[in-house]
Image (spheres, rainbow, N blue to C red):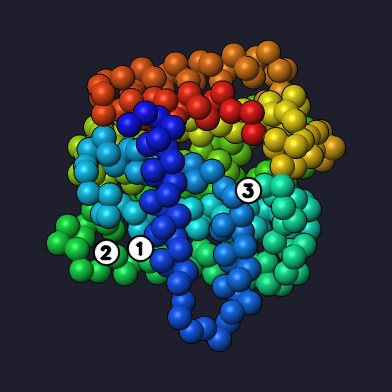
Amino acid sequence: MNFKEKNQDYISLTNKHLNQYFDFKKSDNKKLIEAMKYSLFAGGKRIRPIIVLGTYNVFGTNNEEVLPYACALEMIHTYSLIHDDLPAMDNDDFRRGKPTNHKVYGEGLAVLAGDGLLNYAFEIMLANAINKENSMSHIKAMYEISKAAGINGMIGGQIVDLESENKEINASTLEYIHMNKTAALLTACFKVGAIIGQGTEKDIQNMSLVGKNLGLAFQIKDDILDVVGDTEKLGKKVGSDEEKKKSTYPVMYGLDFSINKVKELTESIHDVLQGYGEKANFLLSLSQYLIDREY
């Protein structure tokens, strides 16, 4: 199975399980569920669950073991997007080429839809872990996810990003924003795959390094696309970072430096993954795909 086929297989597997988690036979809060599903099934690339599954398959073979975490991470990511788009945050009207959640359902319901996705993610993970014989591995995976999504991870990066708008910031602050707002959750995806796959501590450390470098490269690539990307392909307006006077790699270091930094990080990622032989071929191809993407 080549990269494209494997990637699509992981997407289909994730979507199948996400649909199962949202197959509520009876619900008194239909509007909330509808709002949650609107953003969750709005055409995302499923990068985070793909990373979880791809990493897990370097170490393990039973995808059912790791799918609850893959789906939970996608829900957590989606909740963060709903909240990021709110008028009090980034104030975006479109996401993935569609009106943002609050434009369709209103700000109050959008907040609750995000809250719902976050809490349901942990409900799913805990329900899965309760009866596992190797429950400590599952608890460890949940700890990594909660840490990455929390005040010293994604939320921490988001608040510093919010406070930095319309200000000149230094390089260390920009690094903190990128490493936490974006890289923390991506790093958790790699670590969770290794943890549930029963990788060694060294394996987990290696996957953590891959995640951090890919997360930073991914965010720098986003910054680059905001300068040179295509609005139609991106599904959102190009130049929004400059319009909001946000500090980014291209603004701070220039476009050429940013492009070279992405290449440098990609080489580092490949150096680590090549040590795992053929089992890491999918992750190698995925990292290159994410770096070369146009949207």
Residue on which the image places disc 2: 129
Q: How far across and down, in percent of the image, does residue 221 sit? A: 62, 28
Q: Judge depth for marks 2 and 3 and give the one in front.
A: 2
- Residue 294 image point, x, y percent: 64, 28
Decide if residue 29 is on the left or right side of residue 248: left
Tell me the residue at 75%/69% (across/down): 106
Q: CA distance from mark 2 to mark 3?
A: 29 Å
Few, some or many residues within 10 Å of mark 1 (<14, 14–19, 20+) = many
Alpha carbon of mark 1 to alpha carbon of mark 2: how far? 6 Å
Q: Secondary structure at mark 2?
A: helix
Against 279, residue 257 (above or below) is above
Q: Earlier in the sequence, mark 1 or mark 3?
A: 1
Q: Are marks 1 and 2 in contact (CB under 8 Å)?
A: yes
Residue 158's disc is 3
The kind of secondary structure element at disc 3 is helix
Q: Are marks 2 and 3 in contact (CB under 8 Å)?
A: no
Amino acid at the residue labelled 3? Gln
What is the number of the mark on residue 125?
1
